[in-house]
Structures are given as structure tokens and as C-alpha cells.
């Protein structure tokens, strides 16, 4: 988990070291929740570095653990990460499936922040497919949720994407 914090602070080298160490220890201890977090962090690092195949592999391992744990929030979050990696690989159809499934889980959990996250990603997929109207609709839906939550960073993200549609 410390690896996740270090990544958020911008120290990917240390984040990778800590996440790899955490993964080894969590596997040794049979702690699948910590292993899933470590795998997700390593997947984010791999994606940021452009190693999309490795990112998908790591996210896939994390997804299997979240499913085993029956943690729907973990599944939803990881599906979004898999969807982003798929879109970056040019697999818009696969990305769409991942993000739609994630949105459904977030809606069932009544997790508005998660819904907004998935909606932004669905807007990105629609934009990549040339469906500007659908992209705008998804970004606007996300912005409404971010406003309800008072999430200025999320509002900014939605507005930036809406501005790119003009």
C-alpha cells in the first residue's frame, strides 16, 4: 500500500520497489487483498511507462484476486484500469466492455465517484470511436456527479475533455 502512496507522490521507482516487496510478502502471507493492491499499483506504473502488455497482465492478476475476494469495488476499479490500457492499445471495443461492466458495478454499489470515473473513461472510448455526441454526454454525466461530490479535480477533468470536443 505504501507503493501506491509513493506512486501518487510521483516516485515511481520507489513505488515499484515497495509494491514488488509488498506483493512478495502478501503472497507469502496469503493476503490477497494487499496482493491485489500491489498488482494494481505495478500495473499503473507499467502503463505509465508504456508497457501496456505488462500492465494488462498485472491488472488481470489483480482482477482475479478481487473476484476471488468478492470485492466488487476492487473489481470495478480494476476493470477501469484494464479498459484504459485496452484503449491505449487501440482496442476500443474491449475497453468499452470493461468500462461498461465497471459502471454497472459502481452503480450497484451507489458509488458516485466510481461512476464518474467510469463515465469519463466511457467518454474517452466514445471519442476514440468518433461518437462525439456520446462522448459529450458521458463527460457531462460525469461532471454532474463530480459537482454533487464537490470534486473540483473531477470537474476539471470533465471540462478539459468537453473543451477538447469543441
Image: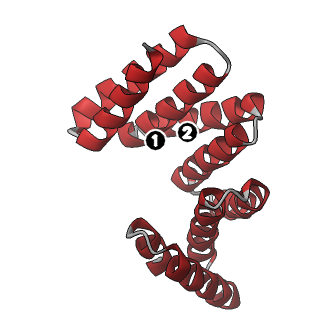
| Left or right for 5, reference 47 | left
* Colour scheme of the rendered structure: secondary structure
Q: Is residue 68 above or below residue 84?
A: below
> How busy is the neighbourhood of tag 1: few (under 14 within 10 Å), some, or many (20 plus)?
some
Q: Which residue is located at x 69 percent, y 84 percent?
A: 27
Residues tagged 1 and 2 counted as in contact (Cβ below 8 A) = yes
Dot 1: element:
loop
Give the residue at the far left of this rendering.
150
Q: Report x, y in % for residue 54.
A: 76, 62
Location of residue 129 (image quadrant): top right
Residue holding disc 2? 105
Q: Report x, y in % for residue 88.
A: 68, 41
Q: Which residue is located at x 46 percent, y 70 percent?
A: 7
Dot 2: element:
helix
Q: Report x, y in % for residue 2.
A: 44, 80
* Nearest the eye: 166 or 120: 166
Location of residue 147 (image quadrant): top left
Q: Which residue is located at x 58 percent, y 39 percent?
A: 102
* Nearest the eye: 89 or 43: 89
Q: Report x, y in % for residue 116.
A: 41, 34
Q: How many marks?
A: 2
> How busy is the neighbourhood of tag 2: few (under 14 within 10 Å), some, or many (20 plus)?
many
Q: Is residue 79 above or below residue 19?
A: above
Q: Which residue is located at x 55 percent, y 39 percent?
A: 105
Residue holding disc 1? 109
| Left or right for 157, reference 37 | left
Q: Is residue 15 above or below residue 148?
A: below
Amino acid at each position: 500500500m505504501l507503493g501506491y502512496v509513493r506512486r501518487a507522490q510521483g516516485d515511481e521507482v520507489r513505488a515499484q520497489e515497495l509494491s514488488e516487496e509488498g506483493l512478495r510478502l502478501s503472497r507469502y502471507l496469503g493476503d490477497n487483498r494487499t496482493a491485489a493492491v500491489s498488482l494494481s499499483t505495478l500495473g499503473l506504473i507499467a502503463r505509465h511507462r508504456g508497457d501496456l502488455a505488462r500492465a494488462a497482465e498485472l491488472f488481470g492478476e489483480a482482477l482475479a484476486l478481487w473476484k476471488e475476494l468478492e470485492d466488487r469495488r476492487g473489481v470495478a476499479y480494476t476493470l477501469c484500469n484494464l479498459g484504459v490500457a485496452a484503449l491505449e492499445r487501440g482496442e476500443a471495443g474491449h475497453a468499452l466492455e470493461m468500462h461498461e461492466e465497471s459502471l454497472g458495478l459502481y452503480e450497484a454499489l451507489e458509488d458516485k465517484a466510481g461512476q464518474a470515473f467510469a463515465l469519463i473513461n466511457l467518454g474517452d472510448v466514445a471519442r476514440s470511436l468518433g461518437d462525439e455526441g456520446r462522448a459529450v454526454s458521458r463527460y457531462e454525466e460525469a461532471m454532474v456527479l463530480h459537482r454533487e461530490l464537490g470534486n473540483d479535480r473531477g470537474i476539471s477533468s470533465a471540462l478539459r475533455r468537453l473543451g477538447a470536443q469543441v
